[in-house]
Image: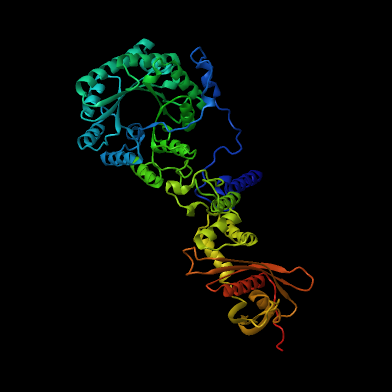
Amino acid sequence: SRLWVYSRAFKLLGCLRMSTVPAANEQTNGNCDPKMPKINGHGAVAKKMPIHKYRAFQDWYQIPFDDKWPKRSWPEKRLSKAPRWCSVDLRDGNQALINPMNFQKKMLLFQHLLRLGYKEIEVGFPAASQTEYDFIRHIIEEKLIPDDVWIQVLTQAREPLIRRTVECVTGAKNIVLHIYNSTSELQRRVVFNKGRDEIKNMAVEGVKLLKELRDSELSASNVRLEYSPESFTGTELDFAVEVSEAVMDVWQPTPEDQVIINVPATVEMATPNVYADQIEWVCAHLTRRDCVCVSLHPHNDRGTGTAAAELAMMAGADRVEGCLFGNGERTGNVCLVTLALNLFTQGIDPMVDFSSLDETISIAEYCTELKVPERYPWAGSLVYTAFSGSHQDAIKKGLAALNVEGANGWEVPYLPIDPVDIGRKYEALIRVNSQSGKGGIAYVLETEYGIELPKEAQAEFATVVQQITDNSGREILSKDIYQAFLSTYIDCLDPFSLVDYDMTKDSTKTVVLDFDTLVTARILFGGESLELSGRGNGPIAAFVTGLNTLFEGVQISLNDYHSSARAHCQAAQSSEAVAVVRCEVSRGKDAGICKYGVGIHGNTTTAVLEAVISALNRIAASGETFAAAPSK
């Protein structure tokens, strides 16, 4: 029984001991971090994902070469102009929101789309809800639609919905009637249980009714037809063309009054080059290509919606539908902002205006209740910001090169677009954390505080900032960088400080000599007042000569000097000089201690002498001792 008791005791102690050892996910550098996610299955082997459930798109989907499409030609082409844009934010984007936009938000976004320059705007699905219907009637009846703008309305190929849609847009000047039905093999088989002919007949009958109502109810309006074989990417190409041709047979478009055939990547199912092949195949096989505006509606399921749209434009598409910042079902529609600014960076007029991009972001975020991520292309709050030291240095040098005479256009490393062109400021280009280097720190000091440091001084001060960021583990703000600079170089007043000085030049000499400048000065050293006098070829050399008479056993020398004006900076007090010197204090033949010092003053000479004092104080802080020479 005694052995049993001992055994139980040891087991209990073992359990207690194990329970007091923190789990790996409960520690971060020895400290508990409540935000750290819980980790399940420590040490578990990675499981094999069920790839057997899926098949490669091109294993079952064929894009055949034939006499009309003997080879793909789009890879040899390049974009040279913007497509026709159509914003579908108010409908396709709106239906995907957790909280759909109310009347006021739809109005705000509609008016902003007009200001951006969009000429085709899908304003709603009138038969879907009374809110949609009332909004469209309001902008028509209040004459809020400019004469050169086409409003687009969406309807399924069903008679009650078509009649409600036409009723809603009566009185509008320019109307795009957008009718769609799903044509993919999967939806025909699983959703509708219908064959090809039945699906084609749905589209044909819907367009027949639209044409009839156009002639009877909308005769005073300019009306365009848009037809979408929805789920086009999963539709056999010959069938997509067959349905589109049947629709065109009913509508009878002309080169002057084209029909819009919208071929949507309702679900992105393959790589972008496959979508481009599909578009080029369709363009090659439409019998009345000059009567058709081929339109794209890419989604972003695979994260390549932008690339798919650009390649499909190269393949012959004329028009693109999308949303601001990629809003839409699932992973969203293609982003109109990204596409437009991509063109802009290639010197192509996007035909829309994003020069005040932050306003567009604010309105979109308010209306959709969705945030634009910090790393979002062109628009994110961090996309023009560099934390990496090498990136910061390259940007700093690139911006400086723009000011060189003869510089042509915008060429700055890591910045394919000038942030000013979209309403951003240079102040946010470079931010500093533990990953940053001397270039970024120097950029902040120079652009925000007018302090230009030589390269070696940048490296020296970078170690000061690096220690701060390493200790905090966080970004350091520009004001804190400046405060660290002041503490390091300007506010260090012990043991040396400059009280006053006088400088004279020997004007009787006809030839300038090496020692024609006399400086007399009074300094405080450890609270004791000392006077010095020295000659040199300038005020710095004379001041250093005088300093060397005050102390025993050390030699003070100056081996770098840099001076610049600070007047261009808002932080400057009127016009100030920034002097940076590198002093060395040595004993005999031994290598000395070198430190930079900085002086800032309205008088250049005073700034230089203050810089020498700053350097000596930093040398003293590093451990060098100074002993005043006996008075003579």
The quadrant the C terminus occupies is: bottom right
The N terminus - image quarter: top right
Residue in front for this viewpoint, 454 or 273: 454
- Can you give x and y, in whole percent of width and height, for residue 631 in the image? 70, 88
Q: Can residue 503 be seen in this view?
A: yes
Instruction: Judge whether 401 appears above or below 80 on screen.
Output: below
Q: Quadrant of residue 372?
A: top left
Q: Kindly indicate the quadrant of the structure image that contains residue 467.
A: bottom right
Q: Where is residue 168 in the image (x, y as percent from the top left)?
A: 22, 28
What colour scheme was applied to this rendering of the protein?
rainbow
Q: Can residue 195 be seen in this view?
A: no
Compare residues 333 and 470 and report the one nearer the observer.
Answer: 333
357 left or right, relative to 564 = left
Front-most of residues 11 and 20:
20
Query: Based on the displayed image, in which of its 4 quarters is residue 589 positioned?
Result: bottom right
x 32%, y 38%: residue = 99
Residue drawn at (64%, 84%), measured in percent from left and top? 530
Where's residue 276, x and y in %?
Answer: 49, 24
Residue furthest front as drawn: 510
Residue extending farthest right: 589
Where 133 sits versus 537, above or below? above
**Count of numbered badges drawn on the protein:** 0
Q: Position of residue 385 (x, y in %)?
A: 51, 49
Q: In this view, does 257 lie to the left or right of 617?
A: left
Classify 217 as above or below 20: above
